[in-house]
Image (cartoon, rainbow, N blue to C red):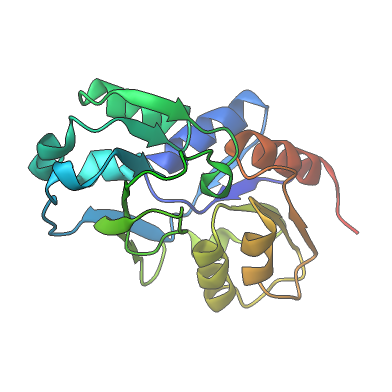
């Protein structure tokens, strides 16, 4: 069985790794980014009806300015984000199941989206960056890429992997979405997108690829 390489930054990398190991996969962590907070100021909450969170990183790195927005109900992209927001004192209005592009956000409301500098739009009235994922110049363990499967969690990760990987013929890519797969470019042993844009579907695909010797 081929090992699975996980590129996402911490703490998401460890969560994905734990799920992968529970499936019996051998896991290697090679984070391509590190997530850090950025300076931001919360707007007047009276100007909005609800808060949109498409990543738990908005809660992890939002800092004290988040306290000014706790009166707004939260629409969270998934269970992990909802749990962290709830623990921080927010009221959860809805929890998505299929990634930011499939969130069922209320129509006609003034939506405030707290996001990263690089993000997928969610149709919000206003977007404020509260964190950013900075590229690791030389990711430790990059020389471990060989006969393996690589899990790609975002188009940006796909682009960064394409910049760094010189030998692609023995690497299979399991991407979380068609956009993430396209960002990886060509020349890989195999390049496939998950059936749904979530960790469970991505790992199911990755497990199949790990068990296969490839084309």
Horizontal placement of 115 versus 3: left or right? left
Residue lying farthest to the right in this orientation: 215
Q: Quadrant of residue 81?
A: top left
Q: Residue at x 32, y 47 (%)?
A: 110
Give the percent coordinates (x, y) of residue 175: 66, 54
Q: Is residue 210 above or below residue 153?
A: above
Nearest the viewer among 70 and 8 is 70
Q: Quadrant of residue 212?
A: top right
Horizontal placement of 88 versus 10: left or right? left
| Image label count | 0
Residue lying farthest to the front in this orientation: 108
Locate the N terminus by quadrant: top right
Horizontal placement of 207 versus 27: left or right? right
Give the percent coordinates (x, y) of residue 155: 55, 64
Q: Residue at x 15, y 40 (%)?
A: 66
Q: Is residue 155 above or below residue 26?
A: below
Give the percent coordinates (x, y) of residue 120: 47, 58
Q: Is residue 93 above or below residue 127?
A: above
Q: Residue at x 51, y 47 (%)?
A: 100
Give the percent coordinates (x, y) of residue 101: 56, 50
Nearest the viewer among 213 and 190 is 190
Locate the C terminus by quadrant: bottom right
């Amino acid at each position: 069985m081929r090992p699975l390489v996980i590129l996402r930054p911490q703490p998401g990398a460890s969560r994905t790794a734990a799920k992968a190991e529970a499936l019996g996969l051998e896991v290697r962590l090679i984070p391509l980014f590190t997530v850090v907070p950025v300076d931001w100021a919360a707007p007047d909450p009276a100007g909005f009806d609800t808060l949109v969170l498409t990543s738990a990183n908005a809660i992890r790195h939002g800092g004290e300015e988040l306290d000014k927005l706790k009166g707004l109900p939260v629409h969270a992209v998934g269970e992990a984000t909802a749990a962290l927001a709830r623990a921080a004192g927010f009221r959860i209005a809805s929890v998505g199941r299929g990634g930011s592009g499939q969130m069922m956000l209320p129509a006609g409301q003034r939506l405030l989206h707290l996001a990263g500098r690089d993000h997928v739009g969610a149709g919000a009235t206003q977007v404020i960056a509260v964190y950013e994922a900075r590229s690791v110049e030389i990711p430790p363990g990059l020389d471990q890429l060989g006969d393996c499967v690589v899990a790609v969690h975002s188009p940006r990760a796909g682009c960064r992997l394409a910049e760094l990987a010189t030998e692609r013929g023995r690497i299979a890519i399991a991407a979380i979405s068609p956009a993430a797969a396209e960002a990886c470019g060509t020349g890989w042993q195999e390049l496939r997108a998950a059936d749904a844009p979530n960790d469970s579907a991505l790992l199911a695909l990755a497990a199949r690829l790990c068990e296969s010797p490839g084309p």
